């Protein structure tokens, strides 16, 4: 969401099934949060925006979520899928709906340009990276770090050191 704020977005809507993750999204500039187990996210985004989202992102790669992102995106705008979608899964996209679909592979970055840019934004306090980290592990603790990711309260595990 930091990137959306840097790009000038004023309305940022986070959708998740976990309330703790929605609370965390508020740290990252979310102006609205939707728990999709309680509220239909497509209808709620329509209500909030009046026309759908200018940009919509699927961060999980579950076909039902990808379909919701397709439906949330405003006609004439785009959606990005950063989650790993099962290559055998299908998601119907209406041709002629004027939606631009983009698959983001490993961040789709240009490291020589993007890493210095993102580092600079972090140093300016415009990218909140520290708040993303829930747990730090050493190399020999990778299995425990992977196990920790099953805890809904954990957002990111980072390898910060050599052998513990």
Image (cartoon, rainbow, N blue to C red):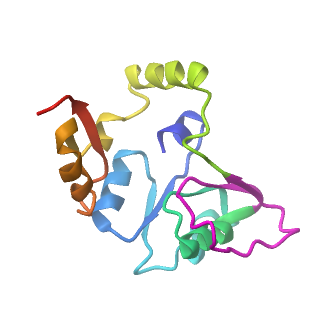
- Looking at the image, the residue that sits furthest to the right is 96
Please tell me which residue lies in front, 28 or 109.
Answer: 109
Magenta segment: does it hold 128? no
Residue 138 appears in view: no
Q: Position of residue 63 (x, y in %)?
A: 58, 73
Vertical placement of residue 146 versus 69, above or below:
above
Q: Indicate left or right for 30 with 103 as reference.
A: left
Quadrant for residue 70, please give it.
bottom right
Quadrant for residue 23, please give it.
bottom left
Q: Residue at x 44, y 22 (%)?
A: 119
Main secondary structure found in the magenta portion: loop
Please tell me which residue lies in front, 42 or 101.
Answer: 101
Q: Residue at x 55, y 43 (%)?
A: 106
Q: Indicate left or right for 91 with 9 as reference.
A: right
Vertical placement of residue 31 versus 123, above or below:
below
Q: Position of residue 148 (x, y in %)?
A: 21, 56
């Amino acid at each position: 969401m930091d990137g959306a704020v840097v790009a000038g977005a004023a309305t940022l809507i986070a959708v998740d099934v976990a309330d703790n993750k929605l609370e965390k999204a508020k740290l990252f500039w979310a102006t609205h949060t939707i728990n999709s187990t309680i509220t239909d996210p497509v209808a709620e985004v329509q209500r909030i925006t009046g026309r759908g989202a200018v940009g919509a992102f699927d961060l999980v790669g579950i076909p039902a979520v990808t379909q919701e992102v397709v439906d949330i995106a405003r006609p004439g705008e785009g959606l990005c899928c950063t989650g790993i979608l099962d290559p055998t899964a299908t998601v119907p996209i209406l041709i002629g709906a004027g939606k631009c679909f983009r698959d983001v592979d490993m961040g789709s970055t240009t490291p020589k340009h993007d890493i210095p840019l993102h580092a600079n934004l972090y140093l300016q306090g415009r990218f909140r990276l520290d708040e993303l980290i829930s747990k730090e592990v050493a190399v020999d603790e990778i299995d425990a770090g992977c196990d920790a990711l099953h805890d809904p309260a954990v957002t990111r595990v980072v390898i910060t050191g050599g052998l513990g």
